[in-house]
């Protein structure tokens, strides 16, 4: 599997430390159908993965420095409770963010992927945020901010998908597949927020 | 305000029956920023409203008969617990679905809009589903299905946006504005699902 760096702190994809997802394979299959995710989408995600592979650093820089840093409400989640920068935390989570782009495009959406989706979800909630990096920051990222930022990710990924000279039609198809995958992942990430007793009131 | 029909059963937008949203104006403004919603988006939504106004019936037909009806997991939410069709329920909710397209494009996103977003959200949860139509159907629509279907709505709206001969650039801008609005609304609709004690375990 393609990686953005040899060592990625806190990146535990496929490791036995990652708990089994509480989402069943059946629920995942149903979600794929609801989102309209097809074999063609899967193929175009693989193409997107090739296209994006050497751009992940620039993309995450764009999201972090170009967008999130300018929105105090979002930027605080990578800062100390006093609002100070945490460069080490940012660098580590940026690397995982880069790898997530590749995983979105190149990984099979199987049990391991499902398990890691749950891990990603929990790392945004009070159950696991800050823990893997041992930092003090906001206790959780509100679900609404995650939902909202997916719109930004979807809009801004497009020029990177067209940066390698593919036809408008192919770029469209890559983009559509990307957006479906993101919405599928968003549905999975919402689970702990909507499950009684897991993360109360982190909307 | 443009309406898809003179009488729309259960459409209570702006009426005193609609409770005040638990989301503050400040939270709404923050969400708009997070989603990247600009004045330009607002203008392009108005244009989208003009473009879509005489197509709402066809669009909702497409979503309901062309897509949802073929996905048992989604279709059941408009059917009886035994799986029988409820044509009156479907007709009524389809009309509201049509009007929602116009409201998305043409309404100002003010306090009344915010209140009605909460009403829409609750009507998908066990708190209010089926009530306004006095029917027996599934007790709620799981949050994950709503998140997933937004991807379908976003993908399938595009040809309708380009049906009136606007330039590719204008269609792109209308579509981008539409997708941001949908994600903003999705964030608002997620609130009751993620709020303790309101709708436990309706993920």
Image (cartoon, coloured by chain):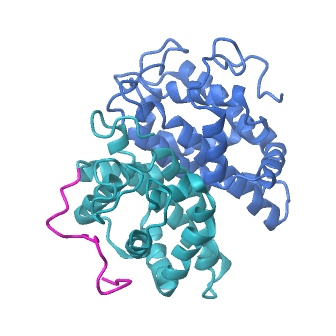
Chain colours: A cyan, B blue
**Residue at the (37%, 29%) spot, across then down:** B196
Residue A181, located in which quarter of the rendered image?
A: bottom left
Quarter of the figure that contains the C terminus of chain A: top left
Q: Is residue A171 above or below residue B199?
A: below
Looking at the image, residue A106 lies above or below residue A132: below
Tell me where the magenta segment starts and ends, as one range: A1-21
Predominant secondary structure in magenta?
loop
Could you tell me residue A30's position as x and y percent? Answer: 35, 48
Q: Nearer the viewer, residue B203 or A35?
A: B203
Which corner quadrant of the image does residue A196 belong to? top left
Residue B65 makes an appearance in the image: no
Residue at 30%, 66% in the rendered image: A133
- Give the side of residue B54 with respect to residue A191, left or right: right
Q: Is B159 above or below relative to A126?
A: below
Relative depth, front residue between A74 and B39: A74
Image quadrant containing the N terminus of chain A: bottom left
- Residue B85 location (% of width, % of height): 46, 25
Residue A105 picture quarter = bottom left
On the question of residue B149 being in view, the answer is yes
Number of numbered tags placed on the structure image = 0
Look at 70% across and 52% down and name the residue there. B37
Residue B28 spot, x, y in % from top left:
64, 39
Asked whether B128 or B197 is in front, the reply is B197
Q: Does the magenta stretch include residue A5?
A: yes
Q: Where is residue A125 in the image (x, y as percent from the top left)?
A: 35, 49
Decide: is A160 above or below A29: below
Please report the residue visible at 44 percent of the width from the left and 48 percent of the height from the top: A34
């Amino acid at each position: 599997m393609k990686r953005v760096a040899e060592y990625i702190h806190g990146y535990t994809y496929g490791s036995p430390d990652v708990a089994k997802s509480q989402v069943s394979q059946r629920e995942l299959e149903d979600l794929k159908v609801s989102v309209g995710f097809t074999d063609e989408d899967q193929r175009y995600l693989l193409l997107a993965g090739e296209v994006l592979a050497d751009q992940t650093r620039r993309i995450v820089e764009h999201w972090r420095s170009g967008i999130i840093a300018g929105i105090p409400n979002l930027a605080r989640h990578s800062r100390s409770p006093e609002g100070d920068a945490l460069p080490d935390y940012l660098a580590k989570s940026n690397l995982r963010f880069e790898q997530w782009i590749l995983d979105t495009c190149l990984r099979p959406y199987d049990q391991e992927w499902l398990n890691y989706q749950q891990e990603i979800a929990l790392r945004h909630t009070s159950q696991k945020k800050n823990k893997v990096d041992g930092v003090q920051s906001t206790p959780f990222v509100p679900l609404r901010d995650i939902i909202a930022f997916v719109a930004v990710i979807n809009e801004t990924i497009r020029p990177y998908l067209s940066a390698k000279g593919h036809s408008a039609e192919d770029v469209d198809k890559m983009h559509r597949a990307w957006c479906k995958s993101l919405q599928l992942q968003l549905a999975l990430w919402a689970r702990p927020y909507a499950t009684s007793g897991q993360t109360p009131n982190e909307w």
